[in-house]
Amino acid sequence: DKEKTFLIRRRKQDRKGQFCSLIQNESMDLLSITVGLLAVLAVGWLISYMSGQRRLPPGPPVVPVLGSFPFMKFPLRNWLCQAKQRYGAVCSFQLNGRQVVFLNTYEAVKEAFVTQGALFSGRPRHIFSTRVMGNSGLVMTDGPSWKRHRRFSLQVLRDCGFGKIGSEDSIVKEALELAAALEETRGQPVSTGNPFGKAVSNVICMLVFGRRLATEDPTFDEKLALINKITQQGVSHPTLRSSVLVPLLTSLAPNFLMSMEAVKKSVKLFDEMFTFCQDEIEKKRSAYNLSDEPADYIEAYLAERNRIEQRDPSEAAEFYGDKKLQSDRSRLPLIEAFLLESQRVYTLIPGGVAHRAIEDTELFGYLVPKNCNVMPNIEALHSDPEVFPEPEKFRIERFIDANGKFAPSERVIPFSIGKRSCLGESLARMELFIFAIVIIQRFRIELPDDEASRMAEILEGTPGTVKAPAEHKLIFKLREE
């Protein structure tokens, strides 16, 4: 019996062992199959990814999470100016988990924004446009809303005489007011930011609100400072830059990001500016009993002041003849050339305003994926030595032909080109021309001795979206009658 019992137990143990071994073998087989499938999927994804990467424009390497960020140098503006020499007409890098394509030549910008303009008419989708701007307005939106607002804006601006000869009167008035204010400085050093900013703002305010707010509103200096913060600091603040660059901040902890003090401050800046504009619109509506028309046609041009970077124009004597205000541009080719060269050398918005590809698109043989941000590298275009020899030098003769006439270049595009070029271009060009005539004809412009040593710093400009000159002072001396 004992032997029989032992044999029975032994058989049970053997069966149990066989069963466990079977289960273990099946588990191992399942694990092997799972690992094999994952490996196949991973290899397939890698092949697909590498195939897609090979079709993308050239650029720095990409690492997980950080993208191309570790391989980029700051200030980014200077690094991008050399992009064409490194990578060619089109380059790309990865930020915030998506590709960003930079267009480094005029041909590339024209192909994308003009020839294929409809495919590149979108605007980026990131925390700035969604959380700060609320996907509203004219500049940072796209699709049917943008088209509707742009049509409305153009119609209203045309009704106001926007860009027409008749609209010169208000610009001339502000230019003469500015000249009178500069005369009162009696040759003493003066900061140019406030008086020039007020003059340009008054032109816009008269057009939009029907009032010279810069003169009439005692709090306008605060609003002007607000505009400066938005354009020169708001979007370029390190925290906001990091929110665009590092995907973890935006995708994993958006609420935490929005609670950060720097982001709160940036949102507050925009809220204050929008509130100011809305208040003025309500005043006009109540005064004239306007119907409930859309009010957000106000262009971001309000932020584009100081288009001419101030410098001592040693050629000034060649610019002016009599003391009369000239409106015939053909008679003043040197001033036209001076203005165009100023906009070439001192690009106001070096990286332009970003576009977004609304579908997979091919550009110069490269793949531009859907929702990829596309940026015109305008400063690189303007400093291309193949187009503008010795680009760092200020030479107005670049735009004067053999007959002494003004010869503009289509490759100088401070307002961008295509469907999404600056809505305020015609007014801005008129302002530039008239303000330049009034100032140059009446004053000799000099740098104070203590500012001359800071010339490189002044011209380096602010780090924000708008490249304004660093804070500085100039001396305005009346020319002899």
Image (spheres, helix red, strand yellow):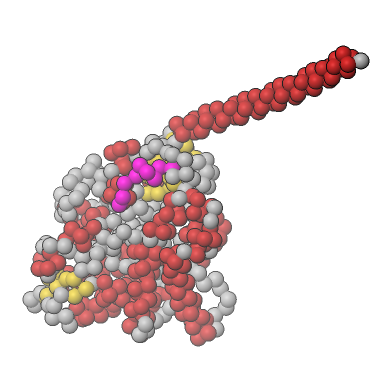
Q: Residue at x 37, y 82 (%)?
A: 219
Q: Which one is nearer the viewer's eye here, 222 or 10? A: 10
**Location of residue 478 by image quarter:** bottom left
Q: Residue at x 49, y 58 (%)?
A: 127
Q: Is residue 47 left or right of residue 227?
A: right
Residue 403 in view in this figure: yes
Q: Which quadrant of the rendered structure holds the N terminus?
A: top right
Q: Residue at x 17, y 83 (%)?
A: 184
Q: Which one is nearer the viewer's eye here, 151 or 136? A: 136
Q: Residue at x 44, y 66 (%)?
A: 261
Residue 93: percent from left, percent from top: 41, 42
In the image, residue 250 sits, relative to residue 188, either above or below, namely above
* In the image, farthest residue toward the left: 480
Residue 166 in view in this figure: no
Residue 28: percent from left, percent from top: 68, 24
Q: Which residues are magenta?
A: 67-75
In the image, residue 51 sits, relative to residue 447, either above or below, namely above
Query: For the stretch drawn in magenta, what is the main secondary structure?
Result: loop
* In the image, farthest residue toward the right: 1
- The question of residue 68 being in magenta is answered with yes
Q: Which one is nearer the viewer's eye here, 465 or 420? A: 465
- The question of residue 380 being in magenta is answered with no
In the image, residue 251 sits, relative to residue 471, either above or below, namely above
Residue 162: percent from left, percent from top: 39, 69
Q: Which quadrant of the rendered structure holds the C terminus?
A: bottom left
Residue 190: percent from left, percent from top: 19, 75
